[in-house]
């Protein structure tokens, strides 16, 4: 497996552009695993530009859910505006018209000047039920329903053995299902909006300590701290990174434009 893991956006809730957020980055969620894009926050804008420049014309965007920070980049995803592109979206927490009409609802007057009928690309929304196994771009993708308001979907990309788990506030039962889902993977990218010292229950998010604990229980080689709190500046993130590395030296703290080589991450089982 020669895929790279590219973090195009790592921030939760809202983008941040101030200097004190510049090291870890302020674009919202988007991660590339080979030909697949996970989520469509503002990070997907840079991802689309780079993939177009590399010659890609067919795109696969796997959405965890459609809360605004995870889809706000879609209207500015350049492949949608090109007639030579095909874009597939995958969504597992909404069904029927609410899923099919997600883009129309996102780009609706008076909140946006044009609607998706202006897109020049061919695009399609593929709806599924979280828990199904998908075949996307010759990749086997397993899915898991996550505990989050209105639901969310976690993904495990086989062969790459990368798990993408955001957004989530796990109870005990969810934690048990998650450990089995991620067991033995190379890396788990996880919703670490909070730490134990500032955790706010019923907000639908988790902590970086839980990320490390789940990875230890499931023998995951590399925990990846992701979906950073929108007010966690670089100094706060450096403190989190220092503490996390002391607990597990294999931990990575995601930064915008960070690239990881999958073969360097290893696997425990």
Image (cartoon, rainbow, N blue to C red):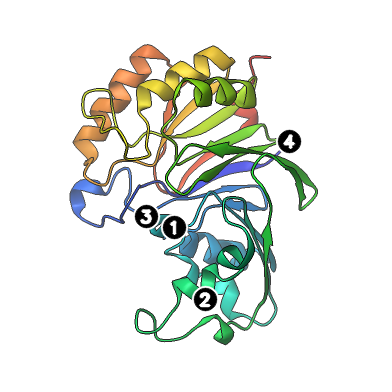
Q: Which residue was labeled with disc 4?
A: 1
Q: Which residue was labeled with disc 3?
A: 27
Q: Are marks 2 and 3 in contact (CB under 8 Å)?
A: no
Badge 2 marks a residue whose secondary structure is helix
Q: Is residue 80 left or right of residue 201?
A: right
Q: CA distance from mark 1 to mark 4?
A: 26 Å
Percent across and percent down for residue 51 are 60, 62
In the image, what residue occupies the spot 80% across and 49% down? 138
Badge 4 marks a residue whose secondary structure is loop
Q: Is residue 18 visible?
A: yes
Badge 1 marks a residue whose secondary structure is loop
**Quadrant where the image shows the C terminus:** top right
Q: Which residue was labeled with disc 1?
A: 41
Rendering quarter of residue 85: bottom right
For residue 104, which numbered disc appears in the image?
A: 2
Disc nearest the viewer among 3 and 1: 1
Q: Are marks 3 and 1 in contact (CB under 8 Å)?
A: yes
Disc nearest the viewer among 1 and 4: 1
Disc nearest the viewer among 4 and 2: 2
């Amino acid at each position: 497996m020669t895929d790279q893991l590219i973090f195009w956006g790592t921030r939760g809730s809202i983008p941040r552009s101030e200097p004190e957020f510049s090291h870890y980055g302020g674009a919202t969620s988007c991660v590339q695993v080979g030909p697949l894009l996970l989520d469509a926050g503002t990070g997907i804008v840079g991802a689309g530009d780079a993939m177009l420049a590399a010659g890609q014309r067919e795109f696969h965007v796997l959405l965890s859910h459609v809360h605004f920070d995870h889809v706000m980049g879609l209207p500015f995803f350049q492949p949608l505006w090109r007639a030579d592109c095909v874009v597939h979206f995958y969504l597992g927490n909404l069904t029927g018209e609410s899923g099919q009409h997600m883009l129309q609802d996102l780009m609706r007057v008076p909140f946006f000047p044009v609607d998706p009928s202006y897109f020049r690309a061919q695009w399609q929304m593929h709806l599924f039920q979280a828990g199904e196994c998908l075949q996307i771009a010759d990749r086997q993708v397993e899915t898991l329903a996550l505990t989050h308001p209105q639901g969310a979907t976690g993904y495990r990309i086989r062969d790459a053995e990368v798990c993408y788990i955001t957004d989530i506030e796990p109870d005990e039962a969810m934690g048990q299902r998650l450990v089995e889902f991620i067991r033995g993977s190379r890396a788990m990218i996880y919703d670490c909006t909070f730490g134990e010292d500032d955790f706010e229950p019923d907000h639908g998010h988790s902590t970086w300590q839980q990320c490390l604990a789940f990875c230890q229980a499931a023998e995951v080689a590399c925990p990846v701290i992701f979906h950073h709190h929108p007010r966690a500046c670089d100094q706060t993130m450096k403190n989190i990174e220092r503490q996390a590395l002391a607990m597990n030296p294999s931990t990575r703290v995601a930064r915008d434009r960070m690239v990881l080589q999958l073969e360097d991450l290893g696997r425990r089982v």
